Image (cartoon, grey):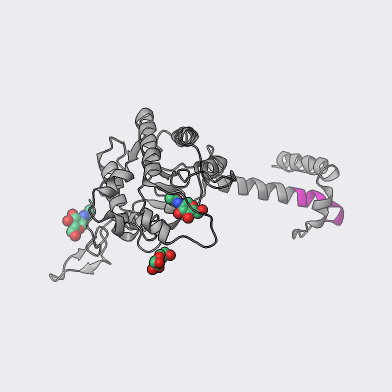
Amino acid sequence: MWEVWGWFGLVGIITTHTIHQPSLTNYNPPCPNHHHHHHHLCMQLLLSQVLEREREREREREMVGPQRPQFVLFGSSIVQLSFSDGVWGAILADVYSRKADILLRGYYGWNSRRALQVLDEVFPKDAASQPSLVIVYFGGNDSMGPHPSGLGPHVPLPEYVENMRKIALHLKSLSEKTRVIFLSCPPVNEAKIRENRSKYLSELVRTNELCRSYSEACIELCQEMGVKVVDLFTAFQRRDDWLNACFTDGVHLSAEGSKVVVEEILKVLKEAEWEPCLHWKSMPTEFGVNSSYDLVVYDGKTTINPSEWTFYREIQWD
Ligand SMILES: *C1O[C@H](CO)[C@@H](O)[C@H](O)[C@H]1NC(C)=O
Ligand SMILES: *[C@@H]1O[C@H](CO)[C@@H](O)[C@H](O)[C@H]1NC(C)=O
Ligand SMILES: *[C@@H]1O[C@H](CO)[C@@H](O)[C@H](O)[C@H]1NC(C)=O
């Protein structure tokens, strides 16, 4: 024990008298039973211990436990808005309640260039635990026509593909168990975009021709890389009423359009040959054990466990 104290003390003396002195003399932790001339050593010691303990906790701690598998939704506005008004992220959070944590990392207006800039920060390779699933959507903004000024979200198609490749490689490298699903660019309601044109923005060039080419390029990349992909461009158009039912403003997804997204994502999760399976019905329910505190059945002898009930859902997702 004394060696440890002595060692901390030595480190204390060195650092106190070199780099950190100004900031440390301002730092004044409570330190009873020490003479004044021991004050610096004592502070150093406390500080080192506190920092060490903090680092230790950082490695182990989860903010809320028990730890569940994490599913991260990473993308532009269609992701940022996905917990709003019964849209697809909110539906997934409901379907996976007691199964997985659905984390939202969506950034309104972003293209794949900006995604690359933050990739290491949002998904650090040395994190204590890694996501089980990342669902990625970028492309709607990239596919907007270029503005003559050179400003704006447009990213040329070949660069978009390369950016998406880098995102997939990074995510796949996080851990052996980190699974990835890309969502391709959905179609838009061109007429509605024109109708809802903002006075404050220059004209937004959004066409289904552009959406289609970015969607196809994304799907081709995924096939090449063995990444699961949902073809949103095609999936929406299977509905006869897609133009009016699937969007709020011609671009962003309505609750109705979100049903298509959730259905397609669940289909991938159900059919994927992933071990462990990430389909909600195959995942354990947290604290799902029977309890005598559950509601009592009419026989007065047994209780009934509600952990797996889903009857309250408008759609019985499969
Ligand atoms: C792209 O970003 C703009 C805002 O800059 C937004 O209005 C538009 O809906 C976004 N589109 C998609 C598909 O993310
Ligand atoms: C889009 O335009 C229509 C008709 O001008 C209007 O009724 C609607 O509220 C607008 N929607 C949005 C989201 O701005
Ligand atoms: C829990 O209760 C259900 C009936 O509600 C019963 O079918 C099941 O076997 C019980 N499970 C355990 C582990 O006791």
Q: Is residue 23 left or right of residue 125?
A: right
Q: Quadrant of ligand 3?
A: bottom left
Q: Main secondary structure of the magenta part?
A: helix
Which residue is painted at 29% across and 42% down in the image?
A: 268
Which residue is painted at 22% across and 57% down in the image?
A: 316
**How far across and down, in percent of the image, does residue 10 sit?**
79, 40
Which residue is painted at 68% across and 48% down in the image?
A: 49
Work out which quarter of the rendered image holds the N terminus and state it: top right
Single out the residue that lies furthest toward the left: 299
Viewer can see residue 65: no
Which residue is painted at 77% across and 40% down in the image?
A: 11
Specify start and end residues of the magenta stretch as a single range: 34-44
**How far across and down, in percent of the image, does residue 246 sit?**
31, 56
**How far across and down, in percent of the image, does residue 295 sit?**
23, 69
**How far across and down, in percent of the image, does residue 229 sit?**
34, 39
- Displayed quadrant of residue 18: top right
Does 303 appear above or below 265?
A: below
Which residue is at the front of the view, 197 or 234? 197
Q: Is residue 110 left or right of residue 91?
A: right
Q: Is residue 130 left or right of residue 189?
A: right
Residue 36 falls within the magenta-colored stretch: yes
